[in-house]
Amino acid sequence: MITLFDPKTDIDLGTPARDSQVQVTLNIDGRSISVPEGTSVMRAAALLGTTIPKLCATDSLEAFGSCRMCLVEIDGMRGYPASCTTPVSEGMSVHTQTPKLATLRRNVMELYISDHPLDCLTCSANGNCELQTVAGQVGLREVRYGYEGDNHLADVKDTSNPYFDYDPSKCIVCNRCVRACEETQGTFALTITGRGFESRVAAAGGDNFLDSECVSCGACVQACPTATLMEKSVVELGQPERSVITTCAYCGVGCSFRAEMKGDKLVRMVPDKNGQANHGHSCVKGRFAWGYATHPDRITKPMIRKHISDPWQEVSWDEAVTYAASEFRRLQQKYGRDSIGGITSSRCTNEETYLVQKLVRAAFGNNNVDTCARVCHSPTGYGLKQTLGESAGTQSFDSVMQADVILVMGANPSDAHPVFASQLKRRLREGARLIVIDPRRIDLVDSVHARAEVHLALRPGTNVAMLNALAHVIVTEGLLNQAFIDARCEGSDFTNWREFVSRAENSPEVLGAVCGVNAADIRAAARLYATGGNAAIYYGLGVTEHSQGSTAVMGIANLAMATGNIGREGVGVNPLRGQNNVQGSCDMGSFPHELPGYRHISNEVVRTQFEQAWNVTLQSEPGLRIPNMFESALAGSFKGLYCQGEDIAQSDPNTQHVTAALSAMECVVVQDIFLNETAKFAHVFLPGSSFLEKDGTFTNAERRISRVRKVMEPLGDKADWEGTVALANALGYPMSYQHPSQIMDEIASLTPTFTNVSYAALDSHGSLQWPCNAEAPDGTPTMHIEEFVRGKGRFMLTGYVPTEEKVNARYPLLLTTGRILSQYNVGAQTRRTDNVAWHDEDRLEIHPTDAESRGINEGDWVGIGSRAGQTVLRARITERVAPGVVYTTFHFPESGANVITTDNSDWATNCPEYKVTAVEVSRVYHPSEWQKRFQEFSDEQHRLLKERRHPEKAEVRK
Ligand code: SF4
Ligand code: SF4
Ligand code: SF4
Ligand code: FES
């Protein structure tokens, strides 16, 4: 889908749409139009194709009425009302073009231009400047006031933000940026200081944009009608020439973007206002942090080596896949068919993950395939399947706009799902009430114009106790929705659950002490959730990454069923998925026990269907999960791994265990865009492709399948799916896809929830939410409406079992981990962008009391020791964490956050218990022993990469 300008969708109608059943008919310049009540005269005129000049109005923001450019005449009305702030009324007769209006508009424009630099020809907005356009529309020919009086032409530029400049000399004080920051982003970082001539835009909380409260979402830049706020990339490269609609490759919100290009160069990413997940908004990562895609660290040639101590040797794709295939076959002959496996990537497309699991099952001949969801949302898959019957969230993001009560548990949307956080905050500003259950005082607890009514700052590891206490209140205080339960849920399971949660041992008074939370607050939260109207739960890895992650997910589903908060808009159970395609990688059969569409591998009917389609015999037993692969590698029975787009050496817990397992393998094949931590243990490196270099689809956290479209050729010659095809063919298992659309057609033919999905359907709908089949040809925004996918909803017993990871005198603090806005996951992408301006190292957050008792000051190096290992980080002293809790991010490999995390895991899914590690913290002066070893190994691997041999010069050492 290559577009230059689509008038249907790109035209700015001036003011937002109004949603009303009542239609109002009016007359504009002699033509009649009917629009919903509340629509502005400006928008009605634009819908007729009549342009009224405007500067301060844009259809993504509420009208402000400050520029006086959009004046009109209306029969029977005195003066010249602003069309942007005047609502239509029945029978109204409007004139948009009269001699008087022309004079008035020209006069206003003269005033603007008398205080504006006349450097249009060299201005970065030249050709795309609304001021320039409006000057043309009003026929401005002279400026009678001259340019000599007081003006702002010498105001100094603020270039502090790495991605955009602020040039106050070009500002017309239209307030669009301020309103974008308030209404669209919800950060309220901008203000207009001074009055009249002195009025200027200022970023609050700092001397410049970088130091201010601005989170660099870019909404203000997009809203600015002049070159005052302008992307540095446009300043450098000029205005783009064409655009391609694609999907962000960072988080599970799945924002749609127009990749704006000049030749084969990406100039900027502009959030697509027709994007159904983001409605024209974005965060700093999607909009600005795409420079990694062409970073010099990209490895674009396949490489092989016999041992990880050997230098790399560049080879052709053919040689690389032939070598990998011969090694895999050698290992299978020597150690058995099950001695190898694969890991799919939640950053790659659906089509790519589907192919990797197909390669493992059909070409390797086993089910040893797993994905990073193992370490994040596998408990969601298990817990929701058990209770509701489907392993996915129940709502669209837009559903939050119908919620009256929003419960956020173990998630930090402002940092990890920023565009959804903006939508959520908008709903809070409209009056929805908020409950936050989180050990940290996350941004939502107390943000501008939105704060939590109840914050339950529970002790890490006590989620299930908290959910049981909430359920106890709902049951014992008569807050159940009995009619819903009777109609929709299994009766005997409900009775058992009601008896269980009613017990005194599950009361807030007992469990509050376990959680470290006041019983009265738990009771208040339960009452609010059960009685406050539509109540929606949003949860994240703070729920799943625990030894009882699956239990907690079931506890959440129990609460929703008990209160009837499921099966319609505004309610539901919504896992906030971390990576862009983690939902998709699970849907595509990446788990060892499930074929695409979450069908168990032991199901003979389903397996036969795949066997016929793939022309192979499939194993009927589940294969190895990632942790089992590591254990088997250390035990000597697992010897080869194909790892596409994942960095298990950094992202998985207990790093030393992982790296020992990788070192024990004889053939590790890594397909990635950089030499990541895992690739340092690899024997074959296949160059990966970024999301800009391929076609495909991603599925976001609301089950929304969106197109990813190629905007440039793969730097390494092959898109990831083409690499997998080549490897399959080299293994003797033929794959002959010419385009990812054919892979999607195969997925659709084998997966009942995808039957109606095709590239053509996606192009015509924009995106589709699965299930999308004969029963739901346009997709399914809300699930479980009439009945649950499993028929009747099933209440599950959720006994609280404390984690084995306990604090004691040696390890008295609890470490919990999370993300930060500017960085993403293992940081391989964002660390290679200017986002490091906000976060260039992982730090340990510690409460002032704990810091003081250990003699730790802000910025000191501190050693963090757990039962698994030790690392050293700098301290940040903050009350965001409670006493007894410390917190860090894991975006930098040298931080070694996962050296400390243990290999405890969820009882049902093996999802690691990242969120609870008992540690001690003390002031130190040197890196940890692990960090020294890491640095040496890493330096050596970089040397081996740098000294890689080129095809004509070397061969693999035999
Ligand atoms: S910076 Fe741009 S959007 Fe903001 S007031 Fe100035 S001209 Fe308007
Ligand atoms: S970039 Fe976003 S947060 Fe920063 S001032 Fe602009 S709108 Fe506000
Ligand atoms: S919110 Fe997520 S999907 Fe949207 S731009 Fe940011 S990182 Fe990308
Ligand atoms: S566009 Fe209406 S007053 Fe500015």
Image: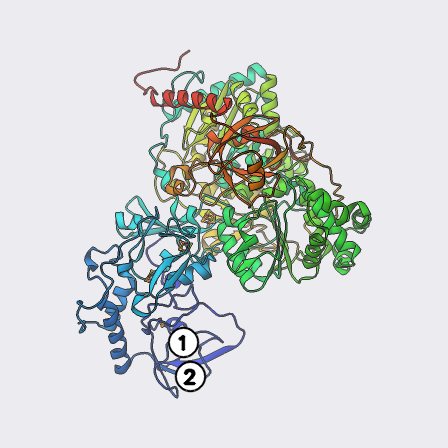
Image coords of residue 179 (percent x, y):
42, 63
Q: Is residue 675 left or right of residue 928?
A: left
Give the number of callouts: 2
Q: Amino acid at mark 2?
A: Met
**Which residue does the numbered mark 1 point to in the structure image?**
41
User: For residue 153, which numbered disc appears in the image?
Assistant: none
Q: Residue at x 82, y 48 (%)?
A: 499
Assess disc 1: are there few (<14), some (14-19) or many (≥20) residues with their C-alpha within 10 Å of its C-alpha: many
- Real-space CA distance between mark 1 and mark 2, rounded to the nearest whole angstrom: 9 Å
Measured from the top left, where is residue 943 in percent x and y? 37, 21
Q: Amino acid under label 1?
A: Val
Q: Secondary structure at mark 2?
A: loop
Q: Is residue 256 visible?
A: yes
The quarter in which the C terminus is drawn is top left
- Comparing 515 with 675, the one in front is 515
Which residue is found at the position 56% from the left and 50% from the top?
702
Above or below, 938 against 608 in this view is: above
From where the camera sits, is residue 847 visible? no
